[in-house]
Image: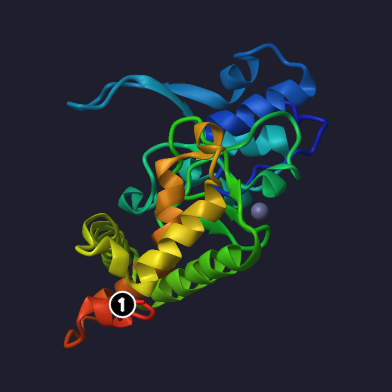
Amino acid sequence: MLARLPIPAGPARHEIVTSYLTRLAVLHGLPEGELWAHVATTRAADRPGRKRGRIVLADRLAVVTGRPVEHLALALPELRDPSPDWTAWRHQSQPGCPRCDARHDGGPVLRLLPHHHYVCTRHRYWIGPPDAGQLPTPLHDQVGDQIVAGQHRHNRLLARYGAAAVFDAVLTGFLISGHLWNHWPKRDQTTAAVHAWKQRAQSLIPSGTETTTYSTSLLFAAVYPEAVSLAELIASRRGGNSPTAILPGSGCS
Ligand SMILES: [Zn+2]
């Protein structure tokens, strides 16, 4: 007989089930595994390539949390039925915005985020795919304004063209930006865009702090606004414009 847990702790948005169950167990002082024993069952290796493992049953979790299955599935993507299109999601869970996470008790919150989720626009944190062990980075000042605005434009692009097209377009935007940054032929005559990337990188990874602040993910943050601008052009499929035509101040400066 399943009993309802007394502390009404809800899941975080996009939280992985393991993270939520761990927090519930910590909050209630339950031994590791006891909650799993109540809400999970063993899945058979019933077809080639599928491993045997435990799966959480949404209706059992609904009983112990007192939350409707539909509400749990909204927050916990693994419990959705039918399953989400996993190609639109990252393959690894990560910490989210620390101010969003602070609303949830019981320990660290691990989330599985969709590919397009790069910034918490409410609290201004970069949560793009992190390097291993990297924590979310706060975004300040004008650099933060530009990166947050990039996420808003990215969201509009997603609503217009869909996840698959926008994923390809933004990835291509990142690749073009990275190529321009690395291979601009005359280092004394950089474009305004390359100048902006250097300024943003300097703001996100200040000189002298590289050993603690450097991450490849923050270099992606530095070029993100222009990568989205390029994606707008690519996703529109209108063609006709040179990609460099939409980089701010493309002329030499
Ligand atoms: Zn947040």
Q: Is mark 1 within 8 Å of ligand 1?
A: no
Q: Position of residue 16 (x, y in %)?
A: 53, 37
114 sits left or right of 34 in the view: left
Q: Position of residue 182 (x, y in %)?
A: 26, 54
Asked whether the viewer can see residue 117, the reply is no
The residue shown at (64%, 39%) is: 62
Q: Amino acid at mark 1?
A: Cys
102 sits left or right of 37 in the view: right
Relative depth, front residue between 88 and 150: 150
Q: Position of residue 212 (x, y in %)?
A: 55, 33
Relative depth, front residue between 249 and 108: 249
Residue lying at the far top in this picture: please name it. 31
Picture layout, residue 7 above or below residue 219: above
The residue shown at (34%, 48%) is: 86
User: Please, what secondary structure does the residue beneath circle 1 have?
Assistant: loop
Residue lying at the far right in this picture: please name it. 6
Q: What residue did someone put label 1 on?
A: 252
Q: Position of residue 1 (x, y in %)?
A: 68, 22
162 sits left or right of 131 in the view: left
13 sits left or right of 55 in the view: right
Relative depth, front residue between 65 and 219: 219
